[in-house]
Image: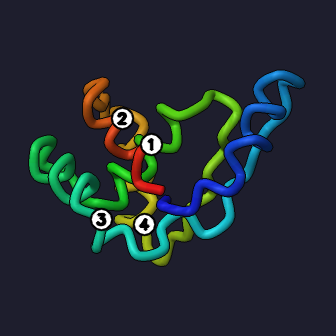
Amino acid sequence: MADRSSEPIIDLCEQESIAFLPWAPMHDIDKLPPVLSAARAHGVSSRQIALAGLLARSSQILPIPGSGSPDHVEDNVAAAAVHLTNQEANALLELA
């Protein structure tokens, strides 16, 4: 989530209308204050906030989070219903 080296590629994916699959987007998210703050505010997990942040960044981003159980899958799917405020989304974008 904090590695923004792919931002130009995401912009190109948007321009060309192709999907971008982020690599390891959940790495160290439990250490990122904006993620933890948004998770508390929405009453959801930090993983759900990270996924919501990726989805808010671009409609071309197609995160494929790992899932070790049916509950984990449900949590991942529920992230699509988390609507971040502009301030929260911007804070996630500014992590790099």
Which label belongs to residue 89? 2
Distance from disc 1 to disc 4, alpha carbons, whole Å, reads 30 Å
Q: Is residue 41 above or below residue 30?
A: above
Q: Earlier in the sequence, mark 1 or mark 4?
A: 4
SS state under label 2 = helix
Badge 3 amino acid: Leu
Residue at (12%, 48%) from the top-left corner? 43
Query: Which of the two discs, 1 and 4, sits closer to the camera?
Result: 1
Task: List the residue tagged with mark 3.
Answer: 32
Q: Are marks 1 and 2 in contact (CB under 8 Å)?
A: yes
Q: Are marks 1 and 4 in contact (CB under 8 Å)?
A: no
Task: List the residue tagged with mark 4.
Answer: 70
Mark 3 crowdedness (10 Å alpha carbons): few <14, some 14-19, many ≥20? some
Query: Which of the two discs, 3 and 4, sits closer to the camera?
Result: 3
Q: Quadrant of residue 11?
A: top right
Q: Nearer the viewer, residue 3 or 71?
A: 3
Task: List the residue tagged with mark 1.
Answer: 93
Residue at (76%, 26%) from the top-left corner? 14
